[in-house]
Amino acid sequence: MRFAIIKLALLFSTVVGFSQQEKLAFRTLALSPSKFPELWVSEAGKPIPITFSSAQPSLPFNADRLSPLPIFKGPLDDKGKPSDPAPSQVSLPAGSSVLLLGWMDGAKPGFLAIEDPFATMKSDDWLVINPSKSEIAIQIGANVQPIPIKANSHKAIKNTAPSGTGAAVTVAAKQPDGSWKAIYTSFWPIYDNQRGLVVVVQRGERLSVSYISDKIATAPVPKP
């Protein structure tokens, strides 16, 4: 136990040491509705809480840029520091703006950081997130080619459907024999001040498709 405490103190002191260096702008998003434990990252050497919702990305916040990024679980100790001796270590993309995805695997949280420059996004800058084990293709609007997204990947796409209207949407999954099967059809509104986030999640042998309307940043995003 003493060794674990010393190791944790050394880890957090490393975070503090780097806190004077580069910062990173974050938002968080849960891949599906889940109850997460208390979670913390470091900003200016101090622990700040982070939360996850599957309904909307969080408001942007800054954190110290460390790759891998330590995410601490559980309550703080009596000195206000993380008590987690083995935090999750999350690799960060090269950009300065990140969407941090979270999910629960039983009692253990999992994380993936993907680049997403949300402060400069326009209404046609959509993001499709496909952590499933199936390759998918998405078609938004008539007379457009479906856009493939590989399994366990994400892709920024341009939505060509005109804003202020709506668009028929089809999502198909690639079958073992190479054919495609439609798994989702709907009609989505297209707004001139919002972009779309599309999340495809594996639920057993089925795929679940969620559409999230993401407001374009109108207020200044905290500068890293």
Image (cartoon, rainbow, N blue to C red):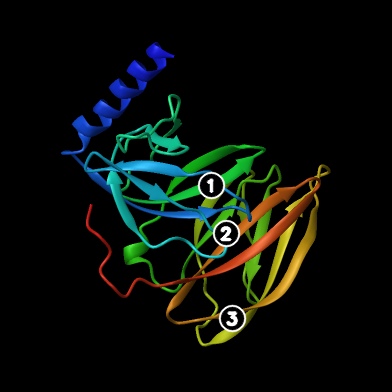
Nearer the N terminus, badge 2 or badge 1?
A: 2
Left or right: where does residue 94 sit relative to residue 108?
left
Residue holding disc 3: 189
Q: In this view, which residue lies farthest toward the bottom?
A: 164
Q: Secondary structure at mark 3?
A: strand
Q: Work out whether mark 3 precedes mark 2 in sequence or the reverse, and give the earlier one.
A: 2
Q: Which residue is mark 1?
A: 102
Image quarter of residue 18: top left
Amino acid type, label 2: Ser
Q: Residue sitting at 45 percent across and 54 percent down?
A: 28
Of discs 1 and 3, which sits in the foreground? Answer: 1
Q: Residue 33, which numbered label?
A: none
Query: Which three-letter amino acid code belongs to the residue tagged 1?
Result: Gly
Task: Estimate the spatial distance between the alpha carbons at disc 3 and disc 2, rounded to whole Å.
Answer: 19 Å
Q: Position of residue 90 (x, y in %)?
A: 43, 35
Q: Residues within 10 Å of mark 3 (few under 14, many from 20)?
A: some
Q: Marks 1 and 3, how far apart in space?
A: 26 Å
User: Label 2's element?
Assistant: loop
Residue that carries the numbered disc 2 in the rendered image: 54
Residue at 64% x, 44% y is 151
Q: Residue at x 71, y 45 (%)?
A: 134
| Towards the viewer: 82 or 68 | 82
The residue located at (55%, 78%) in the rendering is 161
Drawn side of residue 169 relative to residue 8, left or right:
right
Q: Is residue 51 above or below residue 94?
A: below
